[in-house]
Image (cartoon, helix red, strand yellow):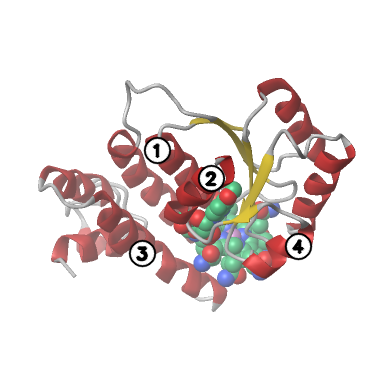
Amino acid sequence: MSDLLKAIAENVIQGRSDKQSPLVKDMAGAPGVKELTERAIKEGMDVEDIINKGLLAGMDVVGKRFKNDEIFIPEVLISAEALGVGMELLKPLIVESGLKPTSKVVIGTVKGDLHDIGKNLVSMMLQGAQFEVIDLGVDISTDSFIDSIKKEKPKILGLSCLLTSSMHEMKTVIDAVKKENLQNQVKIMVGGAPVTQDYASRIGADGFAEDAVIAVDRVKELIK
Ligand code: B1M
């Protein structure tokens, strides 16, 4: 892997957004995620590589350290912020402008869950594939999802969830869509780290995607 991508990953791990970030003494003044991502873009690196082998590779290490109690929420947040700085720079490359959106997608993270990095990535990829995306945000109640389906009339409803303790909310939303007789109007796609195809099938979702790239393909299939 290129040294530049490794440096991006390392700076996400250290939570260094830019060269002003004073978090690691040894790295004072060295370029952070912002400068390194700008450099990668300038060098014409593949956007998916910058995301997967740079930004997300770093976040993967952060996740493992968090799980092992080697780091705690403040460090994870600082890393997530650094990752976000890189994502913002890549957004214009992912989201091509000027073309008419094909179909509407409403997306949100379910109630009780505040994780939004993966959901944002899915949103960006869908926008890049010319979908109009209404992003409701995080901790979204079933009522808000239902209101939004009625108001926006999307072809797809996307539910994201990262916490096993909130996964049941996906089923609650799906049941509510059926109760409101909206299931013929909208297809439901679910995703997030703990979600599997088996779980998606069991709760009655129309589709499941394990990552943001697959999510775009899945939406296209569901719309057909
Ligand atoms: Co939290 N967190 N977190 N966290 N966090 C996890 C999810 C956890 C696995 C960490 C761990 O223990 N190893 C664990 C959940 C355990 C479980 O439920 N089994 C956990 C926990 C426990 C918690 C708290 C409860 C911690 C606490 O307070 N004690 C708390 C919960 C707060 C809440 O939500 N109510 C909490 C808080 C946080 C932060 C706020 C510090 C921060 C979130 C910041 C933010 O999102 N703005 C955070 C983070 C960053 C993580 C980890 C480290 C990274 C998540 C992430 O962004 N990954 C995470 C560990 C991990 O996953 N390795 C962890 C990168 C992202 C691109 O991947 O979101 O999986 P992901 O998205 C992927 C796919 O899943 C898929 O595509 C994306 C791109 O490829 N995808 C979809 C996602 N949504 C999709 C929707 C689709 C289709 C595909 O269709 C609609």
Is disc 3 placed on a helix, strand or loop?
A: helix
Disc 2 residue type (three-letter): Val
Task: Answer few, some or many: residues within 10 Å of disc 4's Cα (few below 14, many 20 plus, some between 14 and 19).
Answer: few
Give the residue at mark 1: 129
Residue farthest along the right direction in this orientation: 179
Give the residue at mark 2: 219
Is disc 4 placed on a helix, strand or loop?
A: helix
Image depth: mark 3 or mark 1 in front: 1
In terms of sequence position, does the residue under pointer 4 or pointer 1 come before the other?
1
Q: Are marks 2 and 3 in contact (CB under 8 Å)?
A: no
In terms of sequence position, does the residue under pointer 4 or pointer 3 come before the other?
3
The Cα atoms of the two marked residues, 2 and 3, are separated by 28 Å
The quarter of the picture where the N terminus appears is: bottom left
Image depth: mark 4 or mark 1 in front: 1
Give the residue at mark 4: 165
Q: Are marks 4 and 2 in contact (CB under 8 Å)?
A: no
Nearest to the observer: residue 200 or residue 82 = 200
